[in-house]
Amino acid sequence: MIETFEPLTQQALCSRLTGHPWQTLVQVLDTVDSTNNAAKQLAAQGAPQGTAILAGHQTAGRGRRGRSFFSPPGAGLYLSVILRPQVPPDRLLHLTALCAVAAARAVEAACGLRPGLKWVNDLVVGRRKLGGILTELTLKPDGSLDHVVVGVGVNCCQTRFPADLADLATSIAAETGVADAKADLAASLLQELSTLEAALLPGPEKDAWLAEFAETCVTLGKDVQVLRSGSVRPARALGIDENAGLLVEYPDGIREVIASGEVSVRGMYGYV
Ligand code: BTN
């Protein structure tokens, strides 16, 4: 039997953002190809920091490394927000990790379940994927940062998945019994993301977020495969550096920090 879900409404979200400076910058749409694409278009037209696009359904939801993000109607949270941090692009190396912490905090606030983070951008519960983060930077012609679009997708309501995802994916409803966390999750996530800027600069805020990322990162201590331009190398994940890079050790004892976005990391025995 096909599951059907109530769509998230603008009213349900905005009523949870009363007094928040981003409350008037939120748009909840019915269907888009990708909320990241829609947000990038708005950003190119000058939309301010905090402009957020949410959709009930994505026809071409995107993940990192050209993967798709399964986005059936009403089942998940599909949200993209425009940020315009006043920092040079090289200060943003840990941005995806910080957004992942924001998403983990928001899931916990919305349903009581604290997901793990698979380095660097996946929310997981046990061995299954709950959601993911896709951050996309746009630079000005002079190389300075124009804007960032942070896209977050979280499986919320579905209790069944297509056969190819059945062993790999999970949802808030399947894990906690909270039937529809979309509005609470969206509001918590926007609140968390709006506090992010202080953590992009060196200082106690950044240290605290990075420590929280490392504590939540289920990849640490695991045997992984480092996938880089066609090559696959086994390694052991040891730690997180100051840019949220993953410190790994290869069987020959050589250590290397893998930058976010540079390579993909897979568990040796499955998705996580
Ligand atoms: C990943 O799994 O690699 C990241 C998935 C990110 C999915 C979200 S859903 C909202 C936003 N729009 C997209 O097309 N992608 C992100």
Image (spheres, helix red, strand yellow):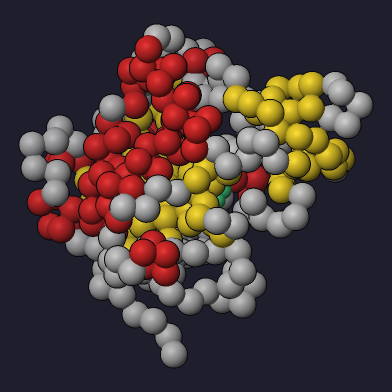
Lateral position of residue 7 relative to residue 271, left or right: left
Name the residue at the front extreme.
221
User: Does residue 69 show up?
Assistant: yes
Can residue 45 be seen here? The reply is no
Residue 76 in which image quadrant? bottom left
Residue 130 picture location, percent across and down: 48, 56
- Residue 102, given in percent of the width and then of the height, sits at 37, 37
Q: Residue drawn at (13%, 57%), measured in percent from left and top?
A: 11
Name the residue at 40% across, 43% down.
104
- Eyeballing the image, is 216 above or below 176? above
Q: Nearer the viewer, residue 80 or 126?
A: 126
Residue 105 left/right relative to 67:
left
Write the residue at 60% across / 25% down.
240
Q: Is residue 61 above or below residue 2?
A: above
The residue at 40%/48% (across/down) is 114
Q: Position of residue 247 (x, y in %)?
A: 69, 25
Q: Is residue 48 left or right of residue 141?
A: left
